[in-house]
């Protein structure tokens, strides 16, 4: 059956109409979904139909069925976890990526998306002030971007000890020691598990969650000449704090360690002149991971891995098969498949290109600065409430607040979520229940901030 040339028209028109309707509700809509996954299962599941259905009708059906179960994550009043929204240009680009349906593994069959991703990668290096010769890969998120940087690190620190990981694997290899701040993100541990490196060695952190240099120095001294990887953090999910990356990197390098920086949301501080000091010296590290789907506000899923030594990344991630070889032969710029774990994948770097092209240099700086400003306003407003206490120094986009004892803080969090005006997730930080705020959405404005503060005030009043 050859597709009629208008085969897509109705399905896409239906999708576009529903997408616009959804986006239009965000300004006024309550943030939480109105129903849960179990309730929705009946509407979207049941028996698989025996035969085909009209594509446009299927799209309409799914849009109507899903709507009550959608969390307004792209709302300007959503501050849960660390969740970015979607810039208009990035969303438009994402639709095109699906329509083009390019398998972005190699340069020669898909030159358009390869060139767009290479341009986006070069812009990211330029904006962040990272070495222009570094390799940039587009992974699914910061979990896999961390994994990828750590895979390059693992292979390299073992190679420096004369161990051939590709041939001999990890069994019998010198044990690779991985030092992490005690408040690193849990997904770093996950990446290390995937890599067979076991649990990392935690290094003490200060009251804001930053790795302590004295403790790092002691840990490095302890390890003798074991192959070592040091993971630093740019942006703590609770406090937003940044490790003293430059000093820690120099210390680690004096011990021959590879330094990897997890900057899932915080790396973008480097693009804002007023915030760049938080990352002083971070360009001296060996690898970096960040997300585009958080601070940069592209749709899921998009993480970015950057490795200063392209050879280290390509050796860890590259795959060669006879049917993949470029007719012109090897050599020249890297293929995308040499920079990320995936072989076949969507061209997820294209929405990054569109986001950066639409914002420009000043737009990225404004975005990051604005998010931080809203976080400060929210922190000041919350601190002024009866019995409230902001627990962190608000240096970036994150705020952690408590309202007396844990029971009261948890009650305020529940009341706030039930109110529905704003979403801030609860958590525990430094042994206390906290209400966590992450300002990560490009569209959050003063009106959203005022409405959200009013909602917190109501929640506090209701839990007297
Ligand atoms: C979100 C986050 C991650 C994990 O990123 P994903 O995109 O969810 O895979 C890792 N580190 C930090 C600091 C984060 O905030």
Image (cartoon, rainbow, N blue to C red):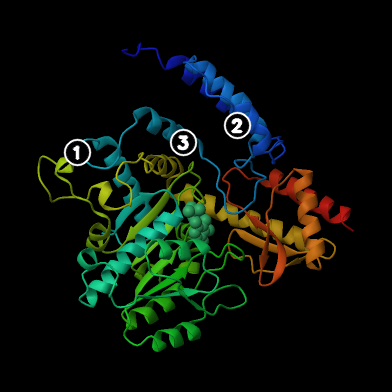
Are the residues at dot 1 and dot 2 in contact (C-beta closer than 8 Å)? no
Q: Is mark 3 within 8 Å of ligand 1?
A: no
Q: Which residue is located at x 47 percent, y 66 percent?
A: 189
Q: Is residue 376 left or right of residue 61?
A: right
Q: Position of residue 335 (x, y in %)?
A: 23, 47
Q: Is residue 109 left or right of residue 223?
A: left
Could you tell which of marks 3 and 1 lies nearer the N-terminus? 3
Which of the 4 image quadrants contains residue 172?
bottom left
Q: Is residue 65 left or right of residue 362?
A: right
Q: Nearer the viewer, residue 279 or 331?
A: 331
Q: Which residue in the protein does label 2 denote?
A: 23
Compared to residue 250, the image places residue 45 above or below, namely above
Q: Which residue in the protein does label 1 denote?
A: 108
**What residue occupies the far right of the structure in this picture?**
464
Q: Which residue in the protein does label 3 denote?
A: 89
SS for tag 3?
A: helix
**Is the N terminus in the top left, top right, bottom left or bottom right quadrant?**
top left
SS for tag 1?
A: loop
């Amino acid at each position: 059956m050859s597709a009629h040339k208008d085969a897509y028209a109705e399905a896409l028109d239906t999708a576009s109409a529903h997408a616009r309707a959804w986006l239009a509700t965000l300004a006024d809509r309550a943030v939480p979904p109105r129903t849960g996954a179990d309730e929705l299962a009946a509407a979207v599941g049941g028996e698989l139909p025996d035969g085909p259905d009209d594509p446009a009708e299927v799209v309409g059906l799914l849009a109507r069925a899903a709507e009550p179960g959608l969390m307004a994550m792209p709302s300007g009043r959503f501050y849960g976890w660390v969740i970015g929204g979607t810039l208009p240009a990035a969303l438009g680009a994402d639709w095109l990526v699906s329509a083009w349906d390019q398998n972005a593994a190699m340069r020669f069959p898909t030159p358009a998306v390869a060139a767009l991703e290479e341009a986006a990668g070069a812009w990211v290096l330029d904006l962040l002030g990272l070495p222009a010769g570094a390799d940039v890969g587009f992974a699914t998120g910061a979990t896999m971007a961390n994994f990828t940087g750590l895979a390059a690190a693992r292979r390299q620190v073992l190679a420096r000890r004369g161990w051939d990981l590709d041939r001999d694997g990890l069994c019998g290899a010198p044990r690779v020691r991985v030092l992490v701040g005690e408040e690193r993100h849990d997904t770093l541990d996950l990446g290390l598990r995937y890599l067979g490196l076991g649990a990392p060695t935690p290094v003490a952190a200060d009251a804001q969650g930053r790795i302590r240099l004295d403790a790092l120095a002691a840990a490095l001294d302890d390890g003798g000449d074991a192959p070592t990887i040091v993971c630093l953090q740019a942006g703590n999910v609770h406090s937003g704090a940044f490790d003293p990356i430059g000093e820690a990197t120099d210390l680690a390098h004096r011990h021959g360690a590879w330094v990897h920086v997890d900057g899932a949301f915080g790396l973008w501080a480097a693009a804002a002149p007023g915030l760049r000091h938080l990352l002083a010296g971070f360009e001296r590290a060996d690898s970096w991971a960040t997300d585009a789907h958080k601070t940069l506000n592209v749709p899921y899923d998009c993480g970015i891995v950057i490795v200063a030594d392209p050879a280290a990344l390509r050796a860890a991630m590259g795959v060669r098969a006879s049917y993949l070889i470029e007719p012109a032969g090897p050599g020249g710029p890297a293929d995308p498949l040499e920079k990320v774990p995936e072989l076949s994948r969507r061209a997820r770097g294209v929405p990054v290109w569109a986001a950066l092209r639409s914002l420009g240099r000043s737009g990225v700086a404004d975005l990051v600065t604005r998010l931080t400003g809203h976080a400060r306003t929210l922190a000041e407003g919350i601190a002024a409430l009866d019995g409230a206490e902001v627990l962190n120094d608000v240096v970036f986009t994150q705020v952690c607040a408590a309202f007396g004892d844990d029971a009261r803080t948890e009650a305020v969090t529940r009341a706030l979520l039930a109110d529905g005006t704003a979403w801030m997730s609860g958590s525990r930080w430094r042994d206390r229940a906290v209400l966590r705020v992450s300002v990560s959405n490009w569209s959050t404005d003063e009106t959203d901030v005022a409405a959200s503060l009013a909602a917190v005030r109501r929640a506090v009043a209701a839990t007297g």
